[in-house]
Amino acid sequence: MAEKKTIIEKIWEDHVVHRDEGQPDLIYIDQHLVHEVTSPQAFEGLRLAGRKVRRPDLTFATMDHNVPTKDRENVKDEISAKQMDALKKNCADFGVKLADMFHPDQGIVHIIGPQLGLTQPGKTIVCGDSHTSTHGAFGALAFGIGTSEVEHVLATQTLYGDRPKTMNVKVNGPLGAGVTAKDLILAIIAKFGVKFGTGYVVEYTGEAVQSLSMEGRMTVCNMSIEGGARAGLISPDEKTVDFLTGRRYVPKEEEAFRAISEKWLSYATDEGAAYDKTIEIDATEIEPQVSWGTNPGMVVPISGATPSVDAVDNKDEITRALSYMDLTENQPITSIEIDHVFIGSCTNSRVPDLKNAAEIIKGKKVKDGIKAIVVPGSFLVKSEAEELGLDKIFKEAGFEWRDAGCSACLGMNDDIIPAGGRCASTSNRNFEGRQGNGARTHLVSPEMAAAAAIEGRFVDVRSYTTEEKIS
Ligand code: SF4
């Protein structure tokens, strides 16, 4: 009988180009995604060595971190402008396809890969960005790499790496109404900590995971890195195949598509395959979540409160986080008032994210004194959302409707939360200063951010559940 394998083992073994016992494996990379921040030195290295890009056809570049989300013609930040000019020149010199900031395919690299069908099950995908784990939602082995590794992949289309240890994060039971993929991944990190995945590639399994849309699966896999994992993925199924059907870089001809989709599904973890480690969580107990502190593990349910310092072992860390966030011990989450709302980032800026937030917002107004922006993940997301009329709903409520980019996720260009400002954010990192020096970030789902915009403080979005769906 054939050995039962996890998807992680299947993909890895399929891609080993060279193996010496006791040494890292050399693996083949199927797709290299490139953006302006981590690529300039890598291309320069190629230039100095007189080398070419080995497989320009397997390399795709876009601009995301540095692009302004309004008045794009006028890039004020000199370093941003320089990095984007460098990417343009490098892509032209080395024959790499580029969706620059005026291109209709432009967007956050982790949004456009799946949209274009570059992201496919069974592929190895790398990018000089830690949230490359997002692509794992399709059953791809996708992870972030450093600048020297970017150069190695550009030059050879291969990468050295240790065979990953495998972890099963098993989510039992269904998620409750009004509880989202974002709440699920925040709850996982809150329960197991920001280092639970260190040294592992994580596969998410179980009823709640299978029930998620592809966009929800991307949200979960996106934040794997915040739990310390090298990558996170979900075995492909019919939902994966449906999402990819007709995408630009997926075969269109019937026979070819049938063959490739059969191959995709064959990567799914075999029933009964063994993992190096399994951890479990009960989805039915998960409420909408809000981060209160300065890492993505400092998270509690909306019905909860900030911790009591006496009750924790890491007293210094908790005290510092409470002080930075200007919160007190045992403070109810619903008492926290915000003054900024950011709906965007590679975690939560896809069409369903915006639609779900718009359903909460529709017919209501952003509370006075709150600055609220929506930044779609790509030009394509923006135009699809506009076809649904979401832009009008947001604008009528008092939100700004922007162009695609990373934006306030990392406090870029003018999209900065000021010192002392407090933001309900759909992004993935709440570190000190992440959204601007002295800025305070609370990670939430798009629905929770939308409700906070209206109320001016965190509320249980389940009380906003509306029958009126946007179709
Ligand atoms: S949206 Fe934020 S986390 Fe995602 S790629 Fe951009 S900067 Fe990184």
Image: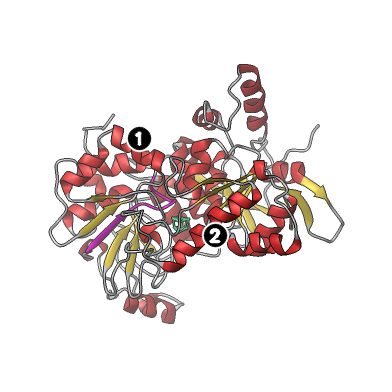
The secondary structure that most of the magenta stretch takes on is loop
Q: Which label was assigned to residue 304?
A: none
User: Can you identify the residue that label 2 sits on?
Assistant: 86
Expressed as whole percent of the image width and height from the top left, the position of residue 61 reads: 55, 49
Find out whether residue 345 is within the magenta segment: yes
Residue visible at 61% across and 47% down?
96
Expressed as whole percent of the image width and height from the top left, the position of residue 437 reads: 35, 74
Near-viewer residue (351 or 288) = 351
**Amino acid found under the numbered disc labelled 2:** Ala
Residue visible at 29% across and 47% down?
447
Expressed as whole percent of the image width and height from the top left, the position of residue 276 reads: 68, 53
Distance from disc 1 to disc 2, alpha carbons, whole Å, reads: 30 Å
The quarter of the picture where the N terminus appears is top right
Q: Which label was assigned to residue 384?
A: 1
Q: Residue furthest right?
A: 20
- In the rendered view, tell whether residue 330 sits above or below residue 401: below
Find out whether residue 242 is within the magenta segment: no
Expressed as whole percent of the image width and height from the top left, the position of residue 453 reads: 21, 54
Disc 2 on helix, strand or loop?
A: helix
Q: Point out the tag, 1 or 2, that comes first from the N-terminus.
A: 2
Does residue 464 show up?
no
Tag 1–tag 2 contact (CB < 8 Å): no
The quarter of the picture where the C terminus appears is top left
Query: Any atom of ligand 1 within 8 Å of the CB at mark 2?
Result: no
Q: Nearer the viewer, mark 1 or mark 2?
A: 2
Near-viewer residue (64 or 447) = 64
The magenta region covers: 338-349
- In the rendered view, tell whether residue 2 sits above or below residue 106: above
**Residue 335, quarter of picture:** bottom left
